[in-house]
Image: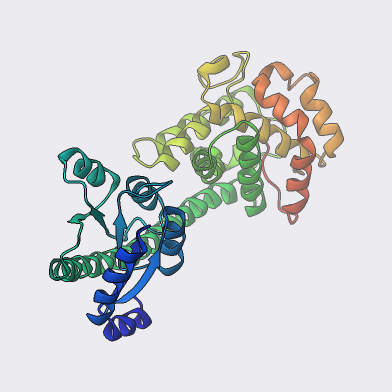
Amino acid sequence: MSFSRKKELMRTKGRVLIVDDERLNVSIVADCLVSSGYEVLTAFNGEEGFRSAHDSSPDVILLDVVMPGMDGFAICKKLKESAATRHIPVVMLTALTDRDSRHKGLEAGAIDFLNKPVDMIELTIRLRNVIELKEYHDHLRVYNEKLEKVVEQRTQELRNSFTDTIYRLTLMAEHKDTGTASHIKRTSHYTSLLASLLGLSAKENDIIYHASPMHDIGKIGIPDEILQNPGELTCEQFETMKQHTTIGGSVLCGSNSEYLKSAKRFALYHHENWDGTGYPYGLKGEEIPLEGRIMLIIDRYDALRSARPYKLPIDHKTTVRMLLEADGRSSPSHFDPMVLDAFKGHHRQFAEIFEEHKDTGVFIEGDI
């Protein structure tokens, strides 16, 4: 409760909204409440009462049941469905005494009932109790809101710490492979773009955005003479290089974190080809987790675009042609058709990401 609201309640016992189509009844009840120290607002039909409740935020609403148009049950239900008014207690005023009517009122969200004609002493006692209860609930609501903000802040701090650790571990693997932070950033942005194009949820997108740069973390277990070899790898060296997928999977396995579970899939499956010709397991089609299918085309695009100790960077147009047409080392049959179509239709955005996060002259080992 705000300080200004507390000051206001010190001046009055509370703010009461009376909603009743019988003006004489409204006048009698209002006069009694004003003389007892309450601030009183009035409305003479359901729609007017609903608007007044939103605009004035009373401490309690005295609501007549039988009114033309929208009756008290409908108004009460509508008030409880609105976030702005659902916390306001509703006391129903009714000449109906049957049990079904009371059940219907409670179902609609009323907290109490008073029979017409209203007993003024009973009314003031009920109001005092209801307003005291509301003040307690308001206090709990404000406290919970503050607590939620603190928890949200601490959760965000933990999340930031977690993603920072991920980033530094990934950067360590990239530095061993003479890589750059720019490559890590590009990987995240490429992945997020494809995730959006493939219809993944915001939460799924966030997870793979942070997990995807860890796809090559297994290279920390590959000897430097292989990683930094400026020439073509021998068959034996290439077999050793292939092990970075299973090493990465081993490093990242066993975690309950959704980020690290996704990272494991990126690390383990990003060299599996749609047609079954990839490694380490030769999986085919949808046997390959989505992370692997997404990273395959991202990895190849970025490797072609980037400079290597043994080659110059390739321009975007040529890279797209090489990926969409078989060139001896890469083939469209390697890619999930759905992922390939998403890339084909939005490849210019890949170029924009590459230009925005260009390398600064430090080489990155290729993955083709």
Image quadrant where residue 115 sits: bottom left
Camera-nearest residue between 215 and 195 = 195
Which colour scheme appears in the figure? rainbow
Numbered-mark total: 0
The picture places residue 214, in percent across and down from the top left corner, at: 52, 42
Residue depicted at 26% across the width and 69% down the height = 139
Residue 219 at least partly seen: no
In the rendered image, the vertical position of residue 247 relative to residue 96, given as above or below: above
In the rendered image, the vertical position of residue 35 relative to residue 115, given as above or below: below
The picture places residue 196, in percent across and down from the top left corner, at: 62, 37
Image quadrant where residue 18 sits: bottom left
Residue depicted at 57% across the width and 43% down the height = 224
In the picture, the quarter occupied by the C terminus is: top right
The picture places residue 3, in percent across and down from the top left corner, at: 35, 82
Residue depicted at 52% across the width and 46% down the height = 210
In the rendered image, the vertical position of residue 11 relative to residue 33, given as above or below: below
In the picture, the quarter occupied by the N terminus is: bottom left
